[in-house]
Image (cartoon, helix red, strand yellow):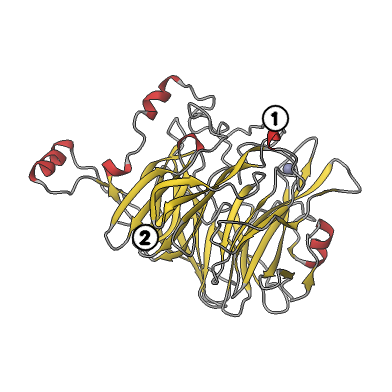
Amino acid sequence: MKGTRVPMITRLTAMLFLLSGISSAGMVDYFTDNGYGNPVAVIQHPCAEYYNRVTYIAYQGPHEDPYVCAYDHAAKKWSGPVQAGENPMGKTPDPVDPKGPDNHGRPAMIVDGNGYIHLVFGGHGGYFRLGKNTLGAAGNGKQTHVVSKNPQDISAWEVLDNISPFGTYSQFVKMDDGDIYLFYRHGSHQSDWVYQKSTDNCRTFSPPVSVLKHKTQQSDPNIHDAWYAWFENGKGDTITASYVYHLCRTNGHTRERYNGYYMKMNCGDESWENAGGNKLVLPVTKEYADQNTLVCDTYTAKEKSNHGTCRVDDDGNPHLFFRRQGQVHYFRWLGNAWQKPVAVPGGDGDMIVESPKVVRMLLTGGGEVCWWRTTDGGLTWAKGSCLISSPDSTYTASTLVRNAHPDGRMVVNENNPAQNHLYRKLYLLGDSGPIGRPEEEASNLGDRLKDLESVQPASKPGKPVKKGRNKLGEEIDSDE
Ligand code: ZN
């Protein structure tokens, strides 16, 4: 089953099965084919959660709208996709060129303490008409919050107008006591990273609190200090932040991102400290971060760096990775210093910390998604089993499913360079490979491909993705 496709049975055989009442129609490895653009990513997270025997999955579908599927592990049955809201940045018809979709508005998802499912999506900093953004710069879209009308039921949704519209890269962190934090960047590149806290299952939120400060550099007014950050549960009542620096040039913009940083919040009094336990003063500026929270300096060597994920061991010590030069660079805190980085082959993914010395990473790379494991605290890594592989396609990772069932660890989307449109198959990968679905249930494109026949791609299939820019000069396809 691993990495293989179940061959489609012929139509005639399927008809015979139907006529005889046997429900073994053709099974496929994907659960839907209507992911669109870049449907999932590591930065908007989690996008899936296992809750009370069911894995709920949110992703970007047609028109960049948020869609939800669910898999009941006990009944072995899929449901959905159901459209859960409308992304104001969606275009009609769906562009077929990779630079067409904005992609920043893909959903993050959390199940609250009462079983209601929440999605936040649709934002890339917020349209100008939404008013003044006091914590950053305007952008596109509107950060939007929807909730399922009933607990553990994906069939109907409603908007809750209770968060800032100036958000992108939305991320949920749910604590053991039920408090839920929503972290995000409060605008386009030149904006603070903030959180809003809810103590009533996302029915109300506190006003935004700045964590990472954006500002113009004193020595060069064309350069703006900006950030890409990733937030997650730490040990107990703490939240970790791992982040990279974005050197944002107002004129002559580039994707320059450097270094790696780490800190954590004590949720009890919302105070922050660095890995060594020294209290920090928030929000953090570039100079302050360099002095107090630096994990690795890549700027001196002008080597680019991008965020990864961060998980903690039973001692509360962080294990994290940053992405550099097509590999992930793993670090862990030794109690008094960061262990020297070790490069592991892989594009992106997430990790499970079993103990301070035993860590597993589930990483995309080439045309496969595979486990890597260390038993010596990250000094050496061995490749393990692959949960899916393909000779033709690559895969894009999301973070690990929250509270994952072993049969459903991670959602990935497939990228097939031979296809001339941007719809993507989505897979739920577990220890036995993808959880399959009858083909007629997984086929959700309807007439969309036919509708696109008249739309010619500007980029030929297989051609490298071109960079596009919106009116503000932001790279609209650099959603990562
Ligand atoms: Zn920038």
Secondary-structure class at tag 1: loop
On the image, which quarter does residue 274 sit in? bottom right
List the single residue furthest toward the left.
20
For disc 1, the neighbor class at 10 Å (few under 14, some 14 to 19, many from 20) is: few
Q: Position of residue 8 (x, y in %)?
A: 24, 42
Q: Is residue 30 visible?
A: no
Q: Position of residue 101 (x, y in %)?
A: 55, 34
What residue is shown at x 35% (from left), y 28% (from top)?
447
For disc 2, the neighbor class at 10 Å (few under 14, some 14 to 19, many from 20) is: many
Q: Is residue 37 visible?
A: yes
- Give the residue number, with chain letter if any, for mark 1: 471
On the image, which quarter does residue 26 sit in? top left
Q: Which mark is residue 54?
A: 2
Does residue 278 appear left or right of residue 175 in this picture? right
User: Which is nearer the eye, 79 or 40?
Assistant: 79
As shown in the figure, which amino acid type bears the numbered disc 1?
A: Lys
User: Which is nearer the eye, 404 or 283?
Assistant: 283
Q: Earlier in the sequence, mark 2 or mark 1?
A: 2
Tell me the CA gap for discs 2 and 1.
42 Å
* Quadrant of the image where one finds ligand 1: top right
Secondary-structure class at tag 2: strand
List the single residue furthest toward the right.
219
As shown in the figure, which amino acid type bears the numbered disc 2?
A: Val
